[in-house]
Amino acid sequence: MLGTILEANEWIMKRKNIGLGHKVFCELMNDLGNPQDNIPSIHIAGTNGKGSTVTYIKDCLVEAGYKVGTFTSPHILKHQDRIRINGKWIDDESFLRLLNHYLNIIEEKQLNMFDIDMLIACAYFNEENVDIAIYEVGLGGRIDCTNCLSHPLVSVITSIGLDHMELLGDTVEKIAKEKAGIIKKGVPCIIGEMIPSVKSVIEEIAVSKQSELIESKKFIQQTMDTFEVDDVCYKIYNSAKYQMRNATVALTVIDCLQRKYKYEISIQNKIDGILKSHWEGRFEIIQKQPTIILDGAHNQEGISALLESIYVLPRPWIFVFSALKDKPAKSMIEQIHEIADELIVTEFDFYRVERAKNLKLWDDILCVENTVEAINKGIEDAHMTGSCILCGSLYFISEARRYLMNRGDSNE
C-alpha cells in the first residue's frame, strides 16, 4: 500500500519506461468489464493541438450543463491534473485510493505510468457518473493504451506532423497511419487541416472501417482574438491563431454530437465555452509588463504555429527555449533564431533533456544552463514593454509555470 500522494506520484513516475504493451492493457480492461466503455466518449489523437481541442470541447459541453471527464497528458502543474471533471483535478484522496485498489493488478500486469493513469481515469469517471469522457492519446494512436475504447461517439485527429519518428515512422504518411489506428468501425472521424497525402492515408482507413470522415469546418480570423465559423463570431482568451484552428476542430466535434447524437448545445453555449476555455501552457499569458508567454511548442509544427501568432506581441521578442534530446531541436532553433530579438537556451533537471551547450548553434545565442536564471534573464531583457516567450518541452513549461506562479508577481 502507498501511504501518501507524494509517495504514490514518485512510485508512478518510476514506471515510465516499463509495461507489456497495448494488448496486455486491453486484455486487463476487458477482465475488469471494460469500464472505459460504460460512458460515452470522444477519442482525440494528433501531433499538436490535442489538449487544447479536448479543453474547447469540454468547455462547450460544460456550458450546456454536461458533466465532462477529461484525460490528458503530460501534466502541467501536478500529476493529478491529467484526470479532471469539469476542469477540476481528481483529488489526492481519490487518486491514492484508486491506485491502492488496483495496486496488485498494476504490478502483476506490469502497467506503466500512462496505463495506470488511464485505468484510474476510467474508474474515477465511472464512480463520478460523468455524462461524457474525452480521452487524449498519449503517443500515436493504434497501440496507445487509450485505444482500448471500443466505441467512442467520435474519433478526432487534430494534425499530423513529424514527431516521435523513432516509434511512429519517418514520414508524415506513416505517422498518419498510426494515428488513424484510433478510427473505429461505424464511428465518425473528424480531422483538422491535412496535406493531401496524409488525408488520403486517413481516408483509406476510414473507408475500410466504414467511418464517416468529416473535415474540420473553416474559420475566418476577424481580429487578433476573434474568428468566425458558420457566420457565428467567437472570441478566444488569447490571440494565438493556432488556437482558433483547434477551437474550430472542437466546434466541428460539437456539431457532430448535436447532429448525430442529439446533444443539446446552444450557439450561446458554444460562444461562452470557447471564450472561457483556457489550456495551461499554450500561448498562455502569465504576466504583462513585460508580457510573459508560456507555450509548449515542442516540435517543428508547434514552433511554426507559435511563430505565426507572436506578431501581436510587443517587441522586443525574447525567447527562452529548452528541448528534449529526441526532438528536432536544431530546426526548431533555426526557426526561432530567424525572428527573435534575443534567444536564450537553457536546460532543466530531466534525464531526456538536451544540454543547453548543444543548443547554442550561433555565437549570438545566449546559453544559460540554470532554468531560473534563464527565465529571469529573459524577463529582464524584455524590459517592461516587450515580450518574453518561454517555449519548447512541456516539461520545461511545467517547471517555468510553477516558478513564475510562485514568484507572486503574475497578474493572471
Image (tube, rainbow, N blue to C red):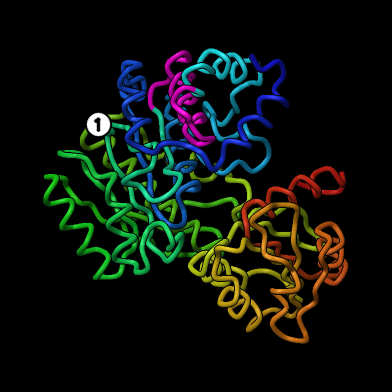
Can residue 315 be seen in this snapshot? no
Specify whether 304 is left or right of 287: left
Image coordinates for residue 393, horizontal then vertical, percent: 62, 58
Residue 117 drawn in magenta: yes
Q: Residue at x 81, y 65 (%)?
A: 369
What's the magenta bit mostly, secondary-structure-wise?
A: helix
Number of marks in picture:
1
- Callout 1 crowding tier (Cα within 10 Å): few <14, some 14–19, many ≥20: many
Outermost residue to the bottom: 363
Q: Name the spot of residue 133 as percent of width and height, x first.
A: 40, 29
* Residue drawn at 52 percent across, 28 percent down: 86
Q: Is residue 96 above or below residue 183?
A: above
Secondary structure state at the residue bearing disc 1: loop
Picture layout, residue 222 above or below residue 284: below
Q: Is residue 16 visible?
A: yes
In this rendered view, identify the residue nearer to me: 177 or 38.
Answer: 177
Q: Name the residue type under label 1.
A: His
Q: Is residue 179 left or right of residue 53?
A: left
Residue 403 is situated, as x and y percent measured from the top left of the image, at: 81, 48
Q: In the drawing, does residue 46 fall left or right of residue 214?
A: right
User: Outermost residue, front direction?
Assistant: 108
Q: Which residue is mark 1?
A: 151
- Where residue 196 sits, quadrant-wise, is bottom left
Q: Which residues are magenta?
A: 108-132
Residue 93 placed where, x, y %? 65, 15
Q: Is residue 171 above or below residue 61?
A: below
Residue sitting at x 58%, y 44%: 278
Q: Nearer the viewer, residue 309 or 401?
A: 401
Residue 196 located within the stretch drawn in magenta: no
Q: Is residue 285 left or right of residue 186?
A: right
Image quadrant holding the N terminus, namely top right
